[in-house]
Amino acid sequence: MPAIEIDAEGTLLTARELRRRGLRLAFDAQMDRATGAPDAEATDRIALSQLVDAFLLDRVGNQDLFAVAHRVGRDLMRTHGCPYTYVAEEREYRQDCPIFKLHATVGVSIAWHFACECSICEADAFTCDHAPGEEYEGKTCSYGAGRMLGIDHVALTANPDFIYTWITNTTEKASDLIHEGVIAKAGDTIRCTHCANCYGLAGPTADDLDPVSRWQNLAAEQGR
């Protein structure tokens, strides 16, 4: 199950909380566009990110948000445009829109080893005279992660602990785009149109709801 995170105010960013925020912000953005308020684009982009994260945290419970997020993306595309960022040093275009996490097929899992240390004296756990929960000169002792000991593994997975580790392929080489006739020269503006015709506007597929089974089915097919 994906790990739960906390925002700057200490609120748990559960799937339910992100759903509530995303839907509310999407509604606010609609009102802003209707009244000509200048914050509509920024509000919609925040809403899109939270709707996507809510779906990834609870795919079945929030499966309706798959289509909602694509509709928000389509509104952004039509109203404000979704330009790629051109990185001159790499001569490539990048698009970091969160909508692509909905179509990601693999994420990264990294296992780290940390030393468990005493919060009072930083000694290894159970090697000093301080006891967890006891106070020493006004400071309560606890054990927590200290120095990093090393990396156990880096793996590709269809069920990463953190939703931001999903790998998205949203980079385009300028040379490829020139060859395809999309742009005349490096640095020309290109815009994303993913949400215009994506099947996601109609909702998720069975594979979108269960990426682990999708991987297992692919593995079975390759093993035949």
Image: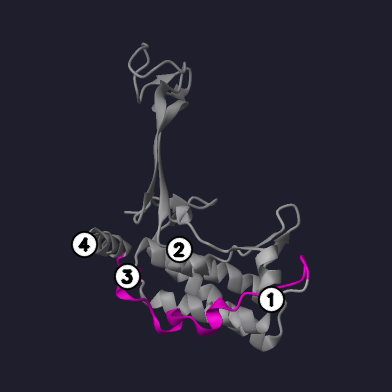
The mark that comes first in sequence, 4 or 2, is 2
- Circles 3 and 4, Cβ within 8 Å, touching? The answer is no
Task: Give the Cα separation between the discs numbered 3 and 4.
Answer: 20 Å
The way the protein has been coloured in the rendering is one colour
Task: Give the Cα separation between the discs numbered 4 and 2.
Answer: 35 Å
Vertical side of 201 occupied by 87: above or below: above
Residue located 48% across and 22% down the image: 138
Vertical side of 38 occupied by 141: above or below: above
Q: Name the residue under label 1.
A: 182
Residue located 53% across and 71% down the image: 48
Residue type at the position of mark 4: Arg
Q: Element at badge 3? A: helix
Vertical side of 183 occupied by 140: above or below: above
Residue type at the position of mark 1: Val
Q: Name the residue under label 3.
A: 207
Q: Mark 2 points at which residue?
A: 53
**For this view, does 62 lie left or right of residue 36?**
left
Residue type at the position of mark 3: Asp
Task: Give the Cα separation between the discs numbered 4 and 1.
Answer: 40 Å
**For this view, does 210 lie left or right of residue 113?**
left
Q: Residues within 10 Å of mark 3 (few under 14, many from 20)?
A: some
Measured from the top left, where is residue 39 in percent x and y?
A: 69, 74
User: Which mark is in front, 4 or 2?
Assistant: 4
User: Which mark is in front, 3 or 4?
Assistant: 4
- Circles 2 and 1, Cβ within 8 Å, touching? The answer is no
Measured from the top left, where is residue 131 in percent x and y?
A: 34, 19
